[in-house]
Amino acid sequence: MYELRNLTKTYTRGKDTIRALDAVDLTIPQGDRLLIQGPTGGGKSTLLQMLGALDRPTSGELLLDGTDLAKLSEARLTRLRSENIGFVFQSFNLIPTLTAQENVETALVPLGVKTKERRELAAEALESVGLGERRAHLPAEMSGGQQQRVAIARALVKRPKVLLADEPTGNLDESMRDEIMDVLERQWKEHGLTFIMVTHDSAIAKKAPRVATIRKGRLTVRENAGA
């Protein structure tokens, strides 16, 4: 699935050069569930953006199924994201004027899916996250946990290979956190996804089979026995 080789990302801030990723080597096989932790500013979000083809490395290789993402044109990267990668964010990123159904359908528009099929797939995706009866509701009419479920349905409706989640439980209380994690883990198992998630929550990290810790751009990976 993913192969990162000597992956480096630097930024210039005034006279300083910031190494957000520093010679990262990492293999993420198909169907893996990897959790990424680390201090603020350590490189977690930068790494996730690289995996999501939202940014390019300064040097090194970033291979997805053998294709080096750093060498693709913007048009090909956009198509790859639309077809193969689903994103879930802390802030939900739902369009407030659209219903749950319509928000989920937006993920299928760039793929050219026709209206009837879009409606059917979106309804099915909402049903799979337990919101079949809330399809006509606007985001403001739903709880934070329900909004995140809509965001998960939107990420998965196109049936991607990869699901990337950036602090998806960060805005939720403990009970909603556990509920959303149950939804994410069930979807990972049922669809054979490669699931990569950034979180500060140690309780979530303890349950992940593999945890990558990134500090000052350097990455270490540990296996969680019994997770």
Image (cartoon, grey):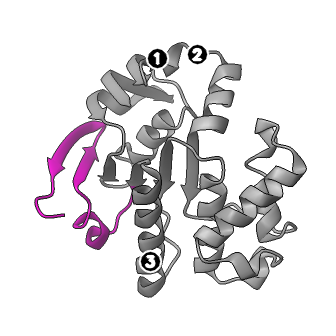
Outermost residue toward the left in this view: 225
Q: Is residue 208 visible?
A: yes
Question: Which disc, if any, is residue 171?
Answer: none
Q: Mark 1 — residue?
A: 68
Outermost residue toward the top in this view: 71
The CA span between labels 3 and 1 is: 35 Å
Question: Which quadrant of the rendered structure holds the N terminus?
Answer: top left
Q: Mark 2 — residue?
A: 72
Left or right: residue 195 versus residue 27 is right
Q: In the image, what residue occupies the spot 58% across and 71% down?
A: 129
Q: In the image, what residue occupies the spot 40% across and 16% down?
A: 59
Which residues make up the magenta segment?
Answer: 198-227
Percent position (x, y) of residue 164? 49, 49
Q: Nearer the viewer, residue 189 or 10?
A: 189
- Going by the numbered disc 3, the residue's amino acid type is Arg
10 Å neighbourhood of mark 2: few (<14), some, or many (≥20)?
some
Q: Quadrant of residue 89?
A: bottom right
Q: Mark 3 — residue?
A: 177
Q: Secondary structure at mark 1?
A: strand
